[in-house]
């Protein structure tokens, strides 16, 4: 694959624009707000909510990469979010249970620990699985479907079906997965009391830093030759193929990266919110994140992040102010943004001549 | 392309600024009216007002608001009025946890009345235990739980499912088919039913689950009809009941030939299913709108006066309505809304409620409740045909049933 990517560029390299420091400066500003101002201003409960929105933002970043940059409309990111989340949840459950069985197995009538669970006792294994399992599933799926040139609506439907199937599987295997209830009631997170304010504060910093690092990584990827190739695949897959590249490889790599991001987000979500359940990874939450990315602006990575945080915040705000009618407001916000700015909120900030 | 970075940063800054604004109004509430500090006592009501569960949970919220209104009209609690803070659980378990946290840490409510599904209760449980705050949960459930920070005002299994099985046994129905929605309550309930059957000479001919919201029941109905059971034990929830009972009716099943005993179908649901489809079938609960006593006449009249004549009252609504009264009584006895004192004062509190005498069992924080089997009438109401005679002591772990030994270990 790397050999393919190292082919000389077909078009001459674009003329270098003078270095613009405003971007990095603003990133630094946002980082200061996120890492210094917010923890000082917000009380623990609100900081915890912000940490939750930021985990969604990590998933959205992956969607931005796969959909905005690569044109792969993935309606099943919840699956990868769930795989990462369950890997973390299983470790925490086993850690809390000590020599006994996790609580839900007791009331589900399971008598011995299932073999699938045993290795998750090891924290290193569990954390590795957070990345490996979603990545492997996405790689396998990508290899199968992109080579068959499945794309557009067919790919979207396929990923959505995957999300629906995943929920049915999790609910049906109550003894193994906790069923509809999912995994909840965690006590300890790597030696810390998971509910303590200090732990939650530490988790907030972890989530914020992970998001920042992944954002920079995705940003670099977008600027790289691979990123240009990805855009080319999005806008003219057949042309890219005729030029001698393999679009399937490019798409599989990107899809896998987006799945890994969702997995990491899921793993961070579990200690922050304290629950992982099938309700979090079905069709509806997967769609909600795609909607958030659309609202923020799918053609810029920052739009994806912005959309996820904004929609998460709007959901909390509206539902607290108007518990009986908040869904209408949420819907109105979505229609308003997409109606006025088809390229999302970030589109307002974009120069007209920039298309990518 | 260069400026995308810039725009990114502007956007993210905007969001964070918004989030900061959101933090502000909450600070004013934390500083000022703490639960018992001001002229009012804040209590949280946390039910699904949107999503699939809204249709059921909104009625419980309404019943709880009625109780709060009545208590306030009678002078409130400890000389203070109750002030409800309503939040939407949105039929989504993590949202229940988030809103419970918000009610406790931001609004500083004295107690929360909330939940319906077991999944929502399981999601809220760690939040209440962590903050040492109180939750009153108003719906019958699968048992095998006893959190020190939850009061369970609905039935546990030995007050609903086991009496239901006793009734079927009394009627000579020994071959049973189990049909349920695919989630924790039906699966756990069916485990208990199978253990009961094994110990009581009953046979289970089949056990089928369908996903929540499933509406295609021709295959399943065929299976049930071909197995020729004496009765069906139905733990389906919500919309599925509509399709299931319609299909049974068109397959020629009647309440006489094959009664279907439901534990999640109450007055509210009968209307949705259509009386014609379900008339004559038995249900198991602790309360019906037709239950005869002074407290119930008053409750039904007050509910209809507030929410409209067409409204019916049901078991979970009554349990939610009771929860507010039971908590208020415990607060009066304790002389404070402080959680540990209220818990301590609660044991042994006995009130005449619409369902009859309800007593709080201090040890398990469940209620003594009378089990009632009813038959669905052509007018959509339910007529009681059997009751347990006296309130049954709650036994969430079924410790007093030898055949249930393996379930509760």
Image (cartoon, helix red, strand yellow):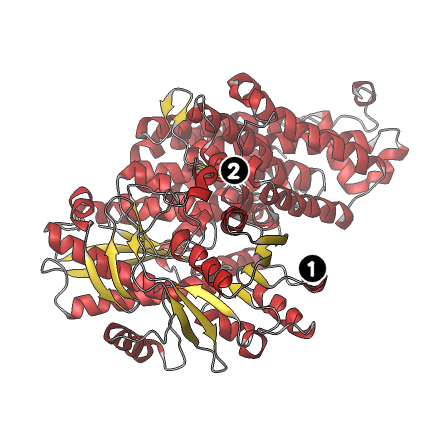
Q: Secondary structure at mark 1?
A: helix
Near mark 2 (Cα within 10 A), the count class, few <14, some 14-19 or many ≥20, is: some
Q: In the rendered image, which quarter is residue B401 located in? A: top left
Q: Is residue B175 above or below residue A79?
A: below
Dot 2 corresponds to which residue? Answer: A109
Q: Position of residue B120 (x, y in %)?
A: 43, 49
Residue in front for this viewpoint, A224 or B390 = B390
Residue B372: x, y in percent? 39, 66
Left or right, A287 with reference to A123: right
In this picture, residue A112 sits left or right of residue A230: left
The disc numbered 2 marks a residue on which chain?
A: A
Q: Nearer the viewer, residue A213 or B326?
A: B326
Evaluate whether residue A168 shows in this view.
Answer: yes
Q: Residue B316: give its label.
A: none
Identify which residue, B201 or A247, lies in the foreground. Answer: B201
Residue at (31%, 42%) from the top-left corner? Answer: B128
Q: Position of residue A248 (x, y in %)?
A: 81, 33
> Among all residues in the image, which is located at the extreme right?
A242
Q: Which residue is mark 1?
A: B227
Q: Is residue A227 visible?
A: no
């Amino acid at each position: 694959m790397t050999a393919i990517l190292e082919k000389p560029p077909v078009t001459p390299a674009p003329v270098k624009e003078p270095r613009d420091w405003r971007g990095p400066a603003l990133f630094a500003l946002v980082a200061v707000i996120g890492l210094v101002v917010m923890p000082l201003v917000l009380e623990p409960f609100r900081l915890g909510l912000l940490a939750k929105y930021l985990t969604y933002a990590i998933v959205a970043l992956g969607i931005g990469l796969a959909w905005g940059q690569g044109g792969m409309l993935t309606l099943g990111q919840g699956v990868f979010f769930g795989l990462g989340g369950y890997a973390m949840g299983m470790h925490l459950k086993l850690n809390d249970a000590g020599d006994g069985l996790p609580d839900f197995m007791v009331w589900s009538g399971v008598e011995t620990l299932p073999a699938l669970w045993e290795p998750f006792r090891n924290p290193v294994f569990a954390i590795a699985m957070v990345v490996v399992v979603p990545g492997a599933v996405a790689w396998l799926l990508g290899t199968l479907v992109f080579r068959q040139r499945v794309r557009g609506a067919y790919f979207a439907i396929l990923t959505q079906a995957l999300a629906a199937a995943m929920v049915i599987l999790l609910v049906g295997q109550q003894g193994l997965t906790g069923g509809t209830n999912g995994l909840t009631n965690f006590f300890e997170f790597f030696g810390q009391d998971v509910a303590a304010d200090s732990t939650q504060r530490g988790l907030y910093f972890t989530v914020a830093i992970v998001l920042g690092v992944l954002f920079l990584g995705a940003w670099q990827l977008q600027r790289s030759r691979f990123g240009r190739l990805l855009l080319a695949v999005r806008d003219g897959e057949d042309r890219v193929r005729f030029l001698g590249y393999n679009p399937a490889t490019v798409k599989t790599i990107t899809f896998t990266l987006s799945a890994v991001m969702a997995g990491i987000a899921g793993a961070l979500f579990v200690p922050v919110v304290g629950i992982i359940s099938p309700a979090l990874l079905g069709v509806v939450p997967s769609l909600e994140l795609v909607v958030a990315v659309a609202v923020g602006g799918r053609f810029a990575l920052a739009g994806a992040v912005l959309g996820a945080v904004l929609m998460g915040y709007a959901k909390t705000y509206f539902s607290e102010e108007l518990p009986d009618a908040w869904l209408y407001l949420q819907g109105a916000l979505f229609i308003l943004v997409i109606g006025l700015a088809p390229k999302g909120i970030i589109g307002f900030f974009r120069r007209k001549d920039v298309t990518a | 392309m260069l400026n995308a970075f810039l725009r990114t940063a502007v956007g993210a800054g905007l969001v964070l600024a918004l989030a900061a604004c959101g933090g502000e109004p909450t600070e004013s509430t934390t500083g000022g009216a703490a639960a018992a500090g001001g002229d009012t006592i804040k209590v949280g009501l946390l039910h699904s007002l949107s999503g699939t569960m809204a249709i059921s949970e909104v009625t419980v919220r309404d019943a709880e608001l009625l109780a709060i209104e009545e208590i306030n009209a009678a002078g409130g609690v400890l000389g203070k009025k109750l002030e409800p803070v309503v939040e939407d659980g949105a039929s989504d378990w993590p949202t229940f946890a988030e809103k419970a946290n918000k009610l406790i840490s931001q609004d500083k409510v004295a107690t929360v009345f909330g939940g319906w599904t077991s999944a929502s209760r399981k999601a809220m449980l760690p939040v209440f235990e962590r903050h040492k705050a109180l939750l009153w949960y108003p719906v019958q459930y699968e048992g095998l739980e006893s959190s020190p920070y939850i009061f369970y005002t609905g039935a546990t299994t030995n007050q609903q499912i086991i009496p239901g099985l006793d009734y079927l046994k009394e009627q000579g129905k020994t071959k049973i088919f189990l049909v349920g929605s695919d989630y924790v309550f039906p699966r756990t309930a069916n485990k208990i039913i199978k253990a009961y059957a094994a110990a009581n000479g009953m046979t289970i001919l089949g056990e089928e689950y369908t996903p929540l919201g499933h509406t295609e029941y021709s295959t399943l109905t065929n299976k049930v009809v071909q197995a020729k059971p004496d009765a069906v034990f139905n733990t389906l929830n919500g919309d599925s009941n509509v399709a299931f009972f319609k299909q049974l009716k068109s397959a020629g099943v009647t309440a006489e030939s094959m009664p279907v005993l439901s534990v999640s179908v109450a007055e509210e649901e009968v209307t949705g299913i259509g009386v014609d489809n379900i008339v004559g079938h038995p249900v198991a609960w602790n309360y019906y709108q037709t239950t005869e006593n002074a407290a119930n006449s008053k409750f039904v009249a007050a509910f209809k006066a507030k929410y409209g004549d067409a409204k019916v009252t049901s078991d979970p609504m009554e349990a939610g309505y009771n929860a507010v009264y039971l908590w208020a009584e415990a607060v009066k006895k304790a002389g404070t809304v402080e959680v540990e004192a209220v818990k301590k004062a609660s044991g042994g509190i006995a009130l005449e409620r619409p369902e009859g005498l309800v007593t709080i069992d201090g040890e398990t924080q469940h209620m003594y409740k009378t089990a009632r089997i009813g038959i669905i009438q052509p007018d959509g109401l339910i007529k009681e045909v059997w009751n347990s005679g006296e309130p049954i002591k709650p036994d969430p772990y079924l410790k007093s049933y030898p055949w249930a030994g393996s379930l509760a270990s």
